[in-house]
Image (spheres, grey):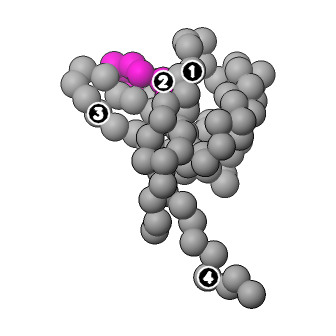
Amino acid sequence: PKFAKGFRLMVLSTNDRTQAMNLRARLLQLFPEQKIYMSFQPPHIKVKLGNFLEKTEAEQYKKEIILNKLVSTEIYLLPEIIEIKTEKNKE
């Protein structure tokens, strides 16, 4: 994979593993096209969504998550180094 500067949404930071796993499952159902990242930084489990090149695209997903009431906490837009899918069949 190639990498570039982009954005991810930090959807949840919790010390409740069950809550993190349930959220991950719901995100996978709603957004199968997006990658979900979970990391453990004691004592917190962080759940992040997506590889967004554009801030506006990340904001759209943030709105969807809020509309679906997936989390009751703040969702943060983080600048990160993201993975870019390379299209092998470019003509």
Which region shows up in magenta? 10-19
Q: Is residue 27 visible?
A: yes
Tell me which amino acid carries mark 4: Lys
Tell me which amino acid carries mark 3: Phe
Mark 3 / mark 1, whichever is N-terminal? 3
User: Does residue 45 lie above or below 15 as drawn?
Assistant: below
Residue placed under numbered mark 1 in the picture: 75
47 within the magenta span: no
Indicate which disc residue 88 carries.
4
33 and 52: which is toward the camera: 52
20 and 64: which is toward the camera: 64
Residue located 55% across and 32% down the image: 9
Indicate which disc residue 12 carries.
2
Badge 3 element: strand
Mark 1 / mark 4, whichever is N-terminal? 1
Q: Is residue 22 visible?
A: no
Mark 2 / mark 4, whichever is N-terminal? 2
Are the residues tagged 1 and 2 within 8 Å (C-beta)? no
For marks 3 and 1, give the one nearer the viewer: 1
For marks 3 and 4, give the one nearer the viewer: 4
Q: Gap between marks 3 and 1, in whole Å?
A: 18 Å
Residue placed under numbered mark 3 in the picture: 40
User: Does residue 43 lie above or below 89 as drawn?
Assistant: above
Tell me which amino acid carries mark 1: Ile
